[in-house]
Amino acid sequence: MQISGVFQSVARGVNRGATALITSPRWGRFVGLGLTTITYAGRRSGRTVTLPVGYRRKGSDIVIGVAMPDGKKWWRNFTGEGGPLSILLAGSERPAHAVATRDSRGRVTVTVRLDA
């Protein structure tokens, strides 16, 4: 198995565990203070994907920092005009629109605006 295959397998396991904690009735309210899940349809594949992400509030926006963005593909679904997703906040799925941007240092952030 190649190193990237091992990394992807480990990442899937970690993501499943984090998602279970975030959505847990017992632990979700604590874990959910800085972690949540987003759900979106892949731009090219059309597959529904749910991922755990770290986030912070910035005014009325929700900002997701993408660690090691060159090794990840999910955020590319939100480049340009961005795209729709749903985000789990306080135990409820909320529809939103997300836009990914890369700054001059190569850092990627995904800014999420909740639908009215």
Image (cartoon, rainbow, N blue to C red):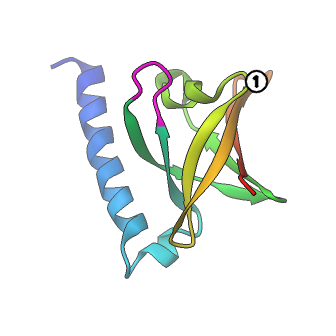
Q: Is residue 67 left or right of residue 41?
A: right
Element at label 1: loop
Quadrant housing residue 58: bottom right
Residue 100 lies in the magenta stretch: no
Q: Is residue 47 above or below residue 1?
A: below
Q: Quadrant of the C terminus?
A: bottom right
Residue drawn at x 72%, y 21% as measured from the top left: 80
Q: Which SS type dominates the magenta stretch?
A: loop
Residue 55 at x, y = what percent?
63, 54
Q: Is residue 60 above or below residue 63?
A: below
Report the front residue among 70 and 42. Answer: 42
Residue 75 at x, y = what percent?
57, 31
Q: Is residue 43 above or below residue 98?
A: above
Residue 45 lies in the magenta stretch: yes
Q: Is residue 63 left or right of residue 34?
A: right
Q: Is residue 14 left or right of residue 64?
A: left
Residue 102 at x, y = what percent?
73, 25
Crowding near pointer 1: few (<14 within 10 Å), some, many (20+)? few
Q: Which residues are magenta?
A: 41-46
Residue furthest front as drawn: 116
Quadrant housing residue 101: top right
Residue 112 at x, y = what percent?
70, 46
Q: Is residue 7 left or right of residue 108?
A: left
Identified by mark 1, the residue type is Arg
Residue drawn at x 81%, y 59% as measured from the top left: 60
Residue furthest left as drawn: 1
Residue drawn at x 63%, y 29% as measured from the top left: 78
Residue drawn at x 39%, y 22% as measured from the top left: 45
Quadrant housing residue 69: top right
Instruction: Give the labeled residue for mark 1.
Output: 105
Q: Quadrant of the N terminus?
A: top left
